[in-house]
Image (spheres, helix red, strand yellow):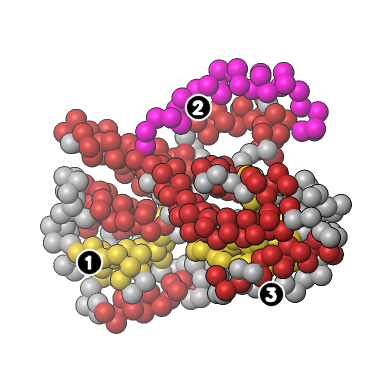
């Protein structure tokens, strides 16, 4: 069980030579990983369209297209062409369209048209395959028509009536084509194209097919260190904990003090208010009676900045609220008359922020977005904190 993990278990995992090899391999640059397109269908379709274009800037001519056509035309149940026709077709004049009438890739040759539906993770739905077939029939009545259903493992379409019309094609077929081209023509290819093809092959094997040597090594390491890896997985950072550090840094830079912590929230006030603040018997972990908080994670649409009075002594709650009301006219759009019986919010402002997307950005972009939020609310936060501080420090007669 993960609860029985010891420091020694973690040390053995880190010192495992296979673990070091995986770390080293994953640090090697890969243009497709850098662009984070591992499982993005649109990005895969864009790259495949480029490769299949005989006039593309890759310099491969019709090498990829020719081998692809051989594969498609070999499936005699779904095409009127034959294997040998692939070599006889004029491939110099080809038009490649992307997302034409929602078809992922459309190849238009002088006498043939090929529609490719690319599914990396999703499945076909809502009768889309039959619609595409009818669309092609209407738009290209005189051409030979071919339909391809591309998936990582060559699975059949869900739409049973379309199985007989679509050639089942897999990303392993693409691997085979690119491997053959590299083996035969590698020495004559431009270095950049070589890098692109090798990186793309690694991406397909590692992320889609799970056949890369690194996948096998990872499985062996997991079986040898299952409990330690499960423990690390359960304690891995998520967008909430990763973004927290950026908000904390921005707030500290603005001179604020950080309050009680909970997942997806960061709470803060001025140091002066924190120093004089009474403590409640309930509420947040550190029992503060008042805090500003930024909820930046749970909605995954916006970041909400709120001024919140914690549960506790009714008289103190009223004093804090009365102090805030003296500034109500300064922020009329953000003022919110408290309605809760325990937690009482009187200030609320929101900013567009999709945490799951933001965390994929580089550190500079994350810092910029977070800093914009903090800087926009900082003046109002200081005013409110100052008013509440004065009220708390004023002796009651």
Please provide percent x and percent y for residue 177. Answer: 31, 44
Q: Quadrant of the N terminus?
A: top right
* Residue at image coords 41%, 60%: 118
| Magenta highlight range | 1-30
Q: Spatial distance from mark 1 to mark 2, Cα to Cα?
A: 44 Å
Q: CA distance from mark 3 to mark 2?
A: 54 Å
Query: In what element is the residue under mark 1?
Result: strand
Q: Would you say the residues marked 1 and 2 are in contact, meaning their CB atoms lie under 8 Å apart? A: no
Would residue 231 appear left or right of 98 to someone viewing this image? right
Q: Residues within 10 Å of mark 2 (few under 14, many from 20)?
A: few
Q: Which mark is residue 337?
A: 3
Q: Residue at x 55, y 65 (%)?
A: 350
- Residue 134 colored in magenta in the image: no
Tag 2 secondary structure = helix
Q: Nearer the viewer, residue 395 or 166?
A: 395
Q: Which residue is mark 1?
A: 108
- Residue 245's x, y, as percent? 57, 42
Which residue sits at x=22%, y=66%? 108
Q: Nearer the viewer, mark 3 or mark 1?
A: 3
Task: Give the residue at mark 2.
Answer: 23
Q: Is residue 229 visible?
A: yes
Q: Nearer the viewer, mark 1 or mark 2?
A: 2
Residue 238 visible from this viewpoint: no
């Amino acid at each position: 069980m993960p609860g029985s993990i010891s420091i020694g278990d973690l040390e053995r995992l880190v010192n495992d030579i296979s673990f070091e090899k995986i770390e080293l391999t994953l640090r090697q640059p890969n243009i497709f990983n850098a662009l984070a397109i591992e499982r993005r269908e649109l990005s895969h379709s864009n790259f495949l369209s480029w490769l299949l274009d005989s006039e593309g800037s890759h310099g491969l001519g019709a090498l990829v297209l020719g081998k692809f056509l051989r594969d498609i035309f070999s499936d005699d149940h779904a095409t009127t062409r034959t294997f040998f026709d692939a070599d006889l077709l004029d491939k110099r004049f080809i038009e490649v369209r992307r997302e034409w009438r929602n078809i992922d890739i459309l190849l238009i040759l002088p006498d043939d048209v090929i529609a490719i539906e690319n599914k990396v993770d999703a499945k076909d739905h809502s009768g889309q395959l039959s619609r595409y077939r009818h669309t092609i029939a209407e738009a290209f009545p005189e051409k030979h028509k071919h339909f391809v259903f591309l998936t990582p493992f060559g699975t059949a379409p869900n739409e049973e009536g379309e199985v007989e019309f679509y050639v089942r094609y897999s990303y392993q077929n693409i691997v085979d084509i690119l491997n053959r081209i590299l083996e035969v023509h590698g020495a004559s290819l431009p270095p950049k194209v070589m890098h692109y093809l090798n990186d793309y092959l690694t991406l397909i094997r590692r992320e889609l097919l799970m056949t890369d040597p690194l996948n096998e090594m990872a499985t062996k390491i997991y079986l040898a260190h299952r409990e330690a890896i499960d423990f690390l997985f359960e304690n891995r950072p998520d967008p909430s904990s990763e973004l927290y550090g950026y908000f904390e840094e921005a707030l500290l830079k603005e001179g604020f003090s950080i309050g009680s912590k909970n997942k997806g929230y960061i709470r803060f006030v001025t140091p002066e208010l924190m120093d004089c603040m009474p403590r409640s018997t309930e509420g947040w972990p550190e029992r503060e009676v008042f805090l500003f908080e930024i909820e930046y994670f749970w909605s995954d649409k916006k970041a909400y900045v709120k001024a919140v009075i914690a549960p506790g002594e009714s008289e103190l709650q009223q004093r804090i609220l009365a102090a805030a009301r003296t500034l109500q006219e300064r922020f009329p759009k953000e003022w919110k008359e408290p309605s809760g019986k325990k937690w009482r919010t009187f200030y609320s402002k929101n900013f567009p922020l999709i945490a799951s997307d933001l965390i994929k950005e580089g550190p500079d972009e994350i810092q910029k977005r977070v800093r914009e939020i903090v800087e926009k609310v900082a003046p109002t936060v200081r005013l409110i904190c100052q008013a509440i501080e004065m009220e708390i420090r004023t002796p009651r007669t």
